[in-house]
């Protein structure tokens, strides 16, 4: 397998949501989690303790995009392309906004 996928969370609403993302990342083999906003505290939703195995960094997302990685905004807005039809790049940095906003 070549390349990787990293995830960026912009101002996640709760620690529980971040924990759920970490657990899913471990299941799907994502490489790194970057969080902008409140710092993550351990959450009971991270049942696999994925934070021990996946790098978790905090800061401004724009400055945390890995070198030569394509940033991709993921959102439910009119005109967006469905992820299942999207041609994913070899090195992707998927950015998700807060659950209660866009």
Image (cartoon, rainbow, N blue to C red):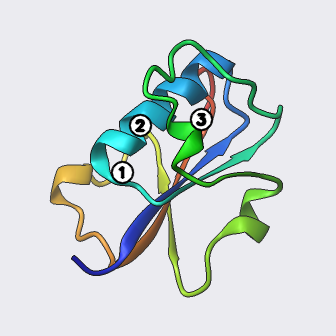
Q: Where is residue 82? Give x, y as percent.
A: 25, 49
Q: Pointer 1: residues within 10 angstroms few (<14), some, or many (20+)?
A: few
For residue 76, the mark is 2
- Nearer-the-camera pick, 77 or 41: 41
Q: Where is residue 22? Give x, y as percent.
A: 50, 36
Q: At numbered mark 3, what does the secondary structure look like: helix, strand or loop?
A: loop
Identify the mark nearer the N-term, 2 or 3: 2
For residue 43, the mark is none
Badge 2 vs badge 3, beta-carbon distance below 8 Å:
yes
Badge 1 vs badge 2, beta-carbon distance below 8 Å:
yes
Measure how far apart labels 3 and 1 are at the Cα level.
12 Å
Outermost residue on the top side: it is 44
The quadrant of the picture occupied by the C terminus is: top right
For residue 102, the mark is 3
Q: Give the residue number, with chain letter if any, for mark 1.
A: 80
Q: Where is residue 11? Give x, y as percent.
A: 73, 35
Q: Pointer 2: residues within 10 angstroms few (<14), some, or many (20+)?
A: few
Which residue is located at x 50 percent, y 37 percent?
A: 50
The quadrant of the picture occupied by the N terminus is: bottom left
């Amino acid at each position: 397998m070549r390349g990787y996928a990293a995830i960026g969370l912009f101002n996640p609403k709760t620690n529980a949501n971040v924990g759920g993302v970490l657990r899913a990342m471990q299941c799907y083999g994502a490489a790194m989690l970057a969080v902008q906003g409140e710092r993550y505290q351990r959450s009971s939703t991270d049942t696999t303790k994925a934070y021990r195995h996946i790098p978790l960094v905090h800061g401004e997302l724009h400055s945390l995009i890995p070198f030569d990685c394509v940033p991709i905004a993921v959102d439910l807005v009119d005109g967006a392309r469905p992820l299942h039809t999207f041609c994913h790049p070899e090195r992707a940095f998927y950015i998700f906004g807060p659950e209660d906003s866009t």
